[in-house]
Image: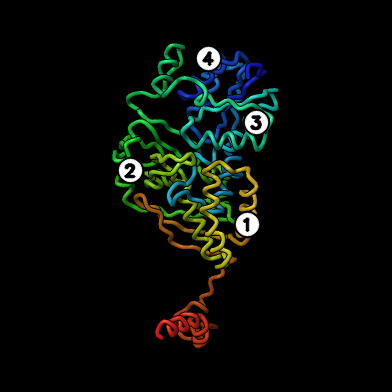
Amino acid sequence: MSDLRKIVLAYSGGLDTSVILKWLKETHNCPVVAFCADIGQGDEVAEVAAKARATGADEVFVEDLKEEFVRDFVFPMLRANAVYEGAYLLGTSIARPLIAKGQVEVARRTGADAVSHGATGKGNDQVRFELTYQALAPDLAIIAPWREWDMAGREDLVAYARRHGIPVPVTAAKPYSMDRNLLHLSFEGGILEDPWAEPPADMFQLTRSPQDAPDAPRYVEIDFICGDPAAVDGVKLTPAGILARLNDLGGEHGIGRVDLVENRYVGLKSRGVYETPGGTILRAAHMAVESLTMDREVMHLRDSLSPRYAELVYYGYWYAPERYALQSLVDESQKHVSGTARLKLYKGNVTVAGRKSPQSLYRPDLATFEAGGAYRQADATGFIRLNALRLKIRAQLEGK
């Protein structure tokens, strides 16, 4: 790679990518473009451009992708009810294909012939970034500094940063790494590497502790159209606006904290702590509307595939043909998922308080336990007899 013309780096302004920016300049002796996708990191985005230039970036692109992130990545995943290993709502996983896509687009605009990222050789993000690069731009060279340089860990990075005058964001007061976007805030590393250690109370940023949340519950109504959220409490908002609003409501009531040990794609287990307030509320609301509007067999088929969908997102196969195929099935299942869910938020819990839909399959005249209605209870006799036939035959055989 000694003859590279230009490199586009996925740059966040944190320790790793700040050191990588300098290292790329020194190692490859070519222009480096810093690319930052604003997908809801908050105030830290405002300082990214200046910091990148101060560290040696030849060009800097900071692009607001919040609406695209929620509309084209979070919402399709929400329609699938995707959760990895029963708990993780995939906030970091779903962001990587969008960031890598943005990198590729910047590489095309600037004439770069290489892309680079700050993911370590032990984690999932290296796979997510590089699968996307190769799916969208197989001609671009890929530079993964963590797999190439001789720095063994973050202590080496801190020393390198101090030698080169690069500000170090990891301190003794915050001995863990964070990744934030509009869907979640994740914490890992440092003091969290001990799975027996409880996360520090002052670590959380998006959510109150449930014990400090308001003593009165908050009710919220969310409207859905074809499986996608469309309004909160009757107010139509953009996709990013909906998620931001629910982040505020959920955070106030301590919703969405998760602490788990998960299985990384590369074969390691890791401990992660997550705050996903808005996403937790949306999933509960979506499933409530689905319960009224989805055919039983369609729902069960989709539900059987949701873990596989979640794996594809977690592993980095967003642009793989099998994910597109699953998405087509998921989206077909959502054509009638329109309606409203009413939720109660209270001290870390989300409870469904009501649901309604003009396309509801729920029939009170059939479901009622009262007399009358169109359902003939006597019909169940033959239904049970036929379904029990194979069990009866086996019992008779074993009895002999």
Pointer 3 residue: 104
**Mark toward the viewer: 2 or 1:** 1
Where does the image place residue 62, in percent across and percent down from the top left?
59, 27
Residue 47 visible from this viewpoint: no
Amino acid type assigned to the residue bearing label 1 in the image? Leu
Dot placed on the residue nearer the N-terminal end, 1 or 4: 4
Q: Is residue 391 left or right of residue 80?
A: left
Residue in the image at 57% along x and 46% along y: 237
- The Cα atoms of the two marked residues, 3 and 4, are separated by 24 Å
| Residue 14 against residue 248 in the figure, above or below | above
Pointer 1 residue: 329
CB atoms of marks 3 and 1 within 8 Å: no
Dot placed on the residue nearer the N-terminal end, 2 or 1: 2
How many numbered marks, from 0 up?
4
- In the picture as drawn, the residue positioned furthest to the front comes out as 400
Pointer 2 residue: 209
